[in-house]
Amino acid sequence: MEAVEVHGPTQELIDSICTKTGDYELCKEIIHKHLETKTANLLDLTYLIFRIAIEHASDTYIFIGNILREHPDPEETTGLNTCLTVYTDETSTFLKVRHDFCREEYERMIIDILSARNILKRCRTDFPIPLNKKKLLIEKSRVMKILITMSAVSGYMVKNGNAYLLSSVVTGPCFFNDVDKVTSILISSL
């Protein structure tokens, strides 16, 4: 699929989301690659990001399953099975996030998105697998982290009803290292 070039309000929304992800160019590339029209509102972009996260988690699950079939070494199998479970959980979580979004249960949606980050941490890549597969798995995990951040940023924008963000809540150590604190902040703001 060829990337769609957008301008104006749609590009401003994409910029608002991507500037908070830690990898602006990759974020922008992901969105543009999957956009089907030149215009999209915040709800459209948010739904698109959730769809991309579901697809990426599912693709990574298949990738890990293929490695398991190729390399049934017990030392590799344990770590790969853990990662397989992680990406099953990520897919399930983002299906739930999308369901929350469609039901306009935005507070619940944000909590579910934040839980995805903790789930992903369980897939460690310090077990022995062929280097070319390890590099791909590490890259897939990096992209998943960015998709989780993109989901959180756009989710906060939807929840707030505009493009205003509390960057201290979404980025930096608070989002990446203290999900429980963010969850309690969200719950207390309800």
Image (cartoon, rainbow, N blue to C red):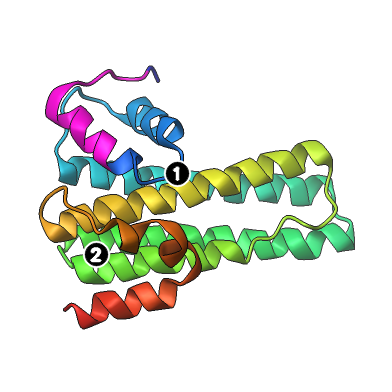
Relative side of 44 to 172, left or right: left
At which x and y percent is residue 96? 34, 64
Relative side of 142 to 75, left or right: left
| Amino acid beneath label 2 | Asp
* 45 to 168, vertically: above or below: above
- Nearest the camera: 49 or 10? 10
Q: Are marks 2 and 1 in contact (CB under 8 Å)?
A: no
Residue for point 71% across, 63% down:
81
Residue for point 16% across, 52% down:
164
Magenta segment's dominant SS is: helix
Assess disc 1: are there few (<14), some (14-19) or many (≥20) residues with their C-alpha within 10 Å of its C-alpha. some
Q: Which residue is mark 2?
A: 100
Residue found farthest to the left: 161
Relative side of 97 to 188, left or right: right
At which x and y percent is residue 67? 75, 46
52 drawn magenta: no
Residue for point 18% across, 77% down:
189
CA separation in Å, label 2 and label 1: 26 Å
Q: Which residue is mark 1?
A: 22
Q: Nearer the viewer, mark 2 or mark 1?
A: 1
The answer to which of marks 2 and 1 sits earlier in the sequence is 1
| Amino acid beneath label 1 | Gly
Relative side of 175 to 189, left or right: right
Question: Bounds of the magenta span?
Answer: 3-16
At which x and y percent is residue 172? 43, 57
- Nearest the camera: 99 or 10? 10
